[in-house]
Amino acid sequence: MLSDKKRARKGGSLVSRAFDKLDDDTTDAERMAADFLTTRGFIHVQAAKTFVTGSITGLVGFILLPLDLYYLIKSMAYTCWGVGAIMDCQLDGKLDFALILALWTGEMEPHEVRHKYSEQATDYRSNSGATKKVTTKGTIKISAKLATKIFLKLLGKSTAGAVPVGGVVSGGVNVWIIESLGKDAETYYTEKQKLFQID
């Protein structure tokens, strides 16, 4: 039987693989968010979508975890990018998502957003202050430490008795994840926008 540490590392590895499989293109997320006037409305709809898949997985437990986890990570990314689109902020794909995950897990504080973004991106503003696509420093990945923190946060919420669950990632937990992550996405993009303001 796996020890708690080994189980956490294995779960973190699943999270890392799900993140690596994500496409960096935010077009679909922008299209999904196009009909929404507020970030709150968009986040609520995304949360409702993840409830259905999570409820099904909750009935069968760990068997569908990798599949459901990838779907959930993708939904999390699209939620974040959709929030950024509604806020009319420049979107930088997996770089944004990785930093929002760091904020969500407590790995990064809100006041660190601009510094951390600047560390990972170059040419993020022109001399006139106009936004443009950034050049990231290498392939965007999440660290093993952050991946494990993400997994433990998912696991911790589902085992804390906050909502009735049948598996690690159930419908109720999925809703909480999307709602809470959406709030951190709002915080992240609010801070990020300050980098693109004309002095």
Image (cartoon, rainbow, N blue to C red):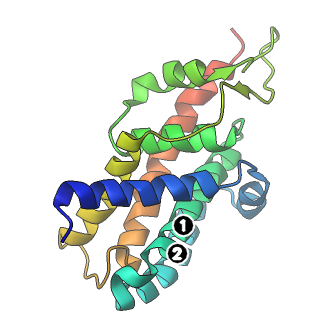
Is residue 135 among what the camera can see? yes
Q: Amino acid at mark 1?
A: Tyr
Q: Residues within 10 Å of mark 1 (few under 14, many from 20)?
A: many
75 on left or right of 199: left
Q: Which residue is mark 1?
A: 70
131 on left or right of 6: right
Is residue 40 among what the camera can see? no
Q: Are marks 2 and 1 in contact (CB under 8 Å)?
A: yes
Identified at 35% across, 59% down, the residue is 10
The residues tagged by marks 2 and 1 sit, at their Cα atoms, a distance apart of 5 Å
Pick the front one: 172 or 59: 59
Pick the front one: 178 or 150: 150
Q: Position of residue 61 (x, y in %)?
A: 34, 84
Quarter in which the N terminus is drawn: bottom left
150 on left or right of 183: left
Residue 175 vs 180, above or below: the answer is below
Secondary structure beneath dot 2 equals helix
Quarter in which the C terminus is drawn: top right
Residue, far front: 1
Q: Which residue is mark 2?
A: 67
